[in-house]
Image (cartoon, grey):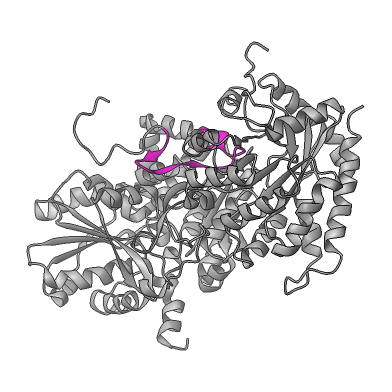
Amino acid sequence: MAEARNTYKSGADEAGHFGLFGGRYVAETLMPLILEVEKAYNACRADPKFAAELKHLNTHYAGRPSALYFAERLTEHFGGAKLYFKRDELNHTGSHKINNTLGQILVARRMGKTRIIAETGAGQHGVATATVCARFGLQCVVYMGAKDIERQKSNVFRMQLLGAEVRPVDKGTATLKDAMNEALRDWVANVHDTYYLIGTAAGPHPYPTMVRDFQSVIGEEVRKQLLEAEGRLPDSLVAAVGGGSNAIGLFHPFLDDADVKMYGVEAAGRGIKTGEHAASITGGSPGVLHGNRTYLLQDEGGQIKDAHSISAGLDYPGIGPEHAWLHFQGRVNYVSATDDEALAAFQFCSKLEGILPALEPAHALAYVAQVAPTLPKEHIIVMNMCGRGDKDVFTVADALGAKL
Amino acid sequence: MSAAIKAKVVDSSNRIAARFALLKKHKRAGLVTFITANDPTPHVFMDILEGLPASGADLIEIGIPFSDPMADGPAIQLSSQRALKHKTRVDDVLEAVREFRKNEIDTPIILMGYYNPIYHYGNQEFAERAAAVGVDGVIVVDLPPEESEELTVHLRANDIHMIFLTAPTSSDARLPTILKEASGFVYHVAITGITGTASANEDAVKVATMRLRKHTDLPIAVGFGIKTPEQARAIGAHCDAAVVGSAIVDIIAKGVDATGKPQAGLTMKVLEFVKSLATGVHGAWP
């Protein structure tokens, strides 16, 4: 306990807990493997060569740093706060997911694993995983809910072009949570050669910490870039939250800057009151699923409920445990935006900025649209544009009644 | 045996210890059967449950259904889904045990499931009510010893055994961590995989149980991948009890129509199969 100063950055503890949340709730067969992943990750963390290798890949393969862009026309449109986008949609593969898959593939290689499995909802993490597997010549199997395959066909084909096998999951609700169940079942059966590359800041320890660390490059860049552009830190950070990897990546480097307010925007689907949403904090309660204790959507009997969101990437009935803890501590505000609000944001962002946002950051923008007009002109908001909307054009067309 | 961890002291009223003592006295391996509560319907489940002891089940595991059974194969996943169609909750499972105990006081009952329904119910309340209705042990698949204290403390206070799983991946270095918390018996998972998929390998089980015996005096039950009376006999030769789940649940699955309605004679079919398993297991020891 050398650290005497109060900090929000000390988690997870040695057992993988963020206060009440997090932990390692897995079957015994996986437990030794989870401990092995933790050991391998700690060794990577302590090795400057690992950091150098990852930095090289981030720069030359993923295209980092991503731009910090002053969204001038939207700022004008809102008539209040000054809005910046962190352009993580410009990364290779079109989202922030590559930050994490590059980091984890290096860990997997050091562990000597030859087969990579992943789960995916919108397909962005699946594509990012298939990409790094192609880059390093590793076998790749991606589990994807049958329902998500239907609404994200282009990403399915992208993964196949990259050499991955996409396995449809028709069990349970046939979405992201079931894909994660199936990936865990695969891992239990193939522990000797397989590495499970989890895409979000959730799951058993050390995944929430590891994914956060790899995504923190987002917030670290923002800090530097905004200091250059404005000579100061932002007033507010806004990011969409499903599992919460892009949000924790943006927030984490600023957690101890008391004046920086943070907003995690959950998917309110058809409205929190309708029960058809994916807002685990706003509309859920603490429970244990997929290896960690966190906020979950569940019924009175502790059965996990279906999530709903127009965005496949937010359509998950849980949230990363560090977010659960940050909510509990009151450090981050968790708010929500509906399908309709996200759709509206998708459209005005396209028309006013010439940027097609993914439906996930469209939720973040929908929240910005609510608060920016009420804030003074010197208030600086940085929103994470964590993915591009090309993958969503069919979903949006369908929602708007357009025939393609 | 100096490093061996002694079994927790259990009093004679403890059904699990009494049952394994009886098996030892009769010089035979035991049969542990698994069925999911309220599968396929509350009524048929109760009939099967009440028929199990006379059909040769020495210990009974009752599954608490869960929407996301990560460690289970298709058979038990589907049994959970059938049970959840009847809105089965922890209270319903406890009520079934209370009903069972009206006529059966010797056969140990072990509840097996995932942590969330129990956690959501409340650990203390769960332990107290489970003890009150006559539950003897609890297996929580996704609650390793590192996370289990918050539940175990209440189970211990209510004389309910927390039964832990060991796996082929549990190293000698790790076994003491698991076994120092274990009581009742040790449940060894025979395969690296989910329930009802690969077949348990007799040689691997032999090696594993010999390894476990160096670390514990508790009885050892082996499960995952035992599907036939022949396999039950072969595996039973190397342990104190063989666990069969998916193969029983599969018969239930085949005995319901598309609407989930059980066919006539389903209970008999299940119990006949259990009898054949018992014959297999009971002949396992020389």
User: Which quadrant of the rendered structure holds the C terminus of chain B?
Assistant: top right
**What is the number of callouts on the image?**
0
Picture layout, residue A170 above or below residue A113: below
Q: Residue at position x 75%, y 41% from top?
A: B107
Q: As drawn, is B74 to the left or to the right of A74? A: right
Residue A274 % position (x, y): 40, 75
| Residue closer to the observer: B121 or A42 | B121
Q: Residue at position x 46%, y 61% from top?
A: A316
| Residue closer to the observer: A109 or B14 | B14
Where is residue A387, by image quadrant?
A: bottom left
B204 part of magenta stretch: no
The answer to whether residue A115 of the structure is visible from this angle is: no
Residue A51 % position (x, y): 36, 36
Q: As drawn, is A339 to the left or to the right of B266? A: left
Picture layout, residue A40 above or below residue A367: above
| Residue closer to the observer: A5 or A348 | A5
Q: Residue furthest top?
A: B2
Residue A181 % position (x, y): 57, 54
Q: As drawn, is A349 to the left or to the right of B146? A: left
Q: As drawn, is A130 to the left or to the right of B18? A: left
Q: Residue at position x 65%, y 39% from top?
A: B136
User: Which quadrant of the rendered structure holds the N terminus of chain B?
Assistant: top right
Where is residue A1, by image quadrant?
A: top left
Picture layout, residue A396 above or below residue B192: below
The answer to whether residue B279 of the structure is visible from this angle is: yes
Residue A302 % position (x, y): 50, 57
Q: Residue at position x 62%, y 49% from top?
A: A185
Give the magenta range.
Answer: A15-35
